[in-house]
Amino acid sequence: MNEDSNNQRAKGPAFQKVIEFLRAQIQFGKLQEHAALPSERALGEQFNISRMTARRALLALEMEGLAYSSDRRGRFVSPQRLTYDISKTVSFSEHAEEGALGLSIKLVSQGMIEATPQIAAKLSIEEGRELYTYTRLFSLKGHPAFIEEEFAIADLFPDMFSHSLEQSTTRLMEQEYNMPAHSGDISIRMRALNEAESKLLNLPTYHAGIELEQVILDHRGQPFCFGRQLWRGELAEFTAHAVVRNR
Amino acid sequence: MNEDSNNQRAKGPAFQKVIEFLRAQIQFGKLQEHAALPSERALGEQFNISRMTARRALLALEMEGLAYSSDRRGRFVSPQRLTYDISKTVSFSEHAEEGALGLSIKLVSQGMIEATPQIAAKLSIEEGRELYTYTRLFSLKGHPAFIEEEFAIADLFPDMFSHSLEQSTTRLMEQEYNMPAHSGDISIRMRALNEAESKLLNLPTYHAGIELEQVILDHRGQPFCFGRQLWRGELAEFTAHAVVRNR
DNA sequence: CCACTATATTGGTATATACCAAGAGAAATC
DNA sequence: GATTTCTCTTGGTATATACCAATATAGTGG
């Protein structure tokens, strides 16, 4: 009942102190991008709290997007957010090559499928039509940024897999198949990663990320490719310019 | 060492079972929107796991966006996602009134400030210029959906606070001040909620949400209002139509 | 009927402990 | 020099327990 001494003079829960400490270290540059944070056990000793409490704080930092962990290697400082203007280009890779983002693309899987009802609807084609599908991992300066899965109408791109998929497919489609992207229908939402996705993106399972779906259209407004990008949430920022219609 | 009997036959961690169970209940409609999920203690008994493990599962469901908790009341099923086309309208409230979304607006705070460097830059005005600022909570069918903070150039809207702010300000600005929105510069990102924001949105602290910033421009391309919406992440989906330029 | 008051329930925080499995790096081996 | 093996560190999972604070509900009194 007496106010006694001692520490505990701060407000709020104990893990708050750890958060504030690390947040300051990160924001004032004492810890650079991708630098290792102290381990759960080390933080516990340093702040005289249990490991689970230290963990609680670190998980909060992950949700803030300031840190990330990758399975049992440790926790690290998240890189800066990067901005992607969806109203100017439908191709991130072309956008990235203009800047010095250090983009690299790794093919994860490829194959052919028949259009499912959902995908057929997106592409305005009949069900069962043949599609190329391929999944690629996009990294910036060696660190995973997003996964992209694309579905392209097979007829339109004969022998597509004879070309390398570890480049901008927008450019491939334009230059090799004379099918330039003219516009795109985009939707953006937040969702949790599943196990496979977490693994690829080097994140814990059930972490939240940002999903960007786009249908890519030719000059006649005809869809020819459907893609789904799953971004590390703390990394992406999307901008657009909107014009009010119907007034 | 022996395979013995018994349960444990599923793969993966124990909390996985709880997740799958509840996910099924939700997706197959046995639990309606905003229905209460079993408590941490109840789940622990039901699945014969400790409360902390049950909690672990429930937190994962929250990150997935399938459930939400509000401080010590319990956990509930998240409502369906709703879609907001940012390339057609800059005003969500007008969009919402057209549908039957059950939109209600509550004024949280209001005041006047001088433009900070950041906001001045967004609005292309000099620092220190007077701004109206107000924060409002937008709810759909009685459940909080997003917080909006707006900054409007005071000169342009004399006596603005004599009007109710619990309506569409876009419409207010258009009809009362002859200042229709013509276009908007939008940016979207994911970030964690702070304490105050969590409280308003009825979510646990450090939960991730989606922030949508927009600068609203008049027909000459002159900014007159800057706004920041913070959405419950599981709720929002943003769509846009993009046209490729510079080719 | 309304205001107050106990009481039970619930999630939030915190600790101490244990074991496991994936990585990283050093040491031993080929 | 390259491969394999061992060891250490790290985060991931799990339990049992404890107390707290906000909430909801049932009961009580004016």
Image (cartoon, coloured by chain):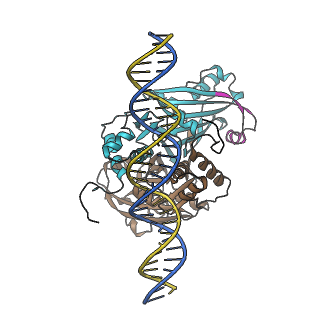
Chain colours: A cyan, B brown, C yellow, D blue
Residue A48 drawn above or below residue B144: above
Q: B242 or B62, which is in the foreground?
A: B62
A230 vs A99, nearest the viewer:
A230
Please name the residue shown 70% across and 23% down the image: A158
Q: How far across and down, in percent of the image, does residue B2 sit?
A: 63, 36
A118 left or right of B1? right
Quarter of the image where the C terminus of chain A is located: bottom right
Q: Is residue B22 visible?
A: yes
From the top left corner, tell me how far across and down residue B4 is, in percent: 65, 40
Answer whether residue A146 is visible to the viewer in this image. no
Q: Is residue A147 left or right of residue A69?
A: right
Question: In the image, residue A115 lies at what x, y percent?
Answer: 72, 36
Near-viewer residue (A222 or D3) = D3
Q: Magenta stretch containing residue A126, yes or no? A: yes
Residue extending furthest toward the left: A5
Name the image quarter holding the N terminus of chain A.
bottom left
Q: B36 above or below B218?
A: below
Drawn side of residue D16 relative to residue B130, left or right: right
Locate residue A94, reporting x and y percent. Answer: 51, 29
- Tell me where the magenta segment starts and ends, as one range: A110-131
Residue A41 painted magenta = no
Q: Is residue A130 left or right of residue B229?
A: right
Residue at 58% across, 36% down? A196
The number of numbered discs placed on residues in the rendered structure image is: 0
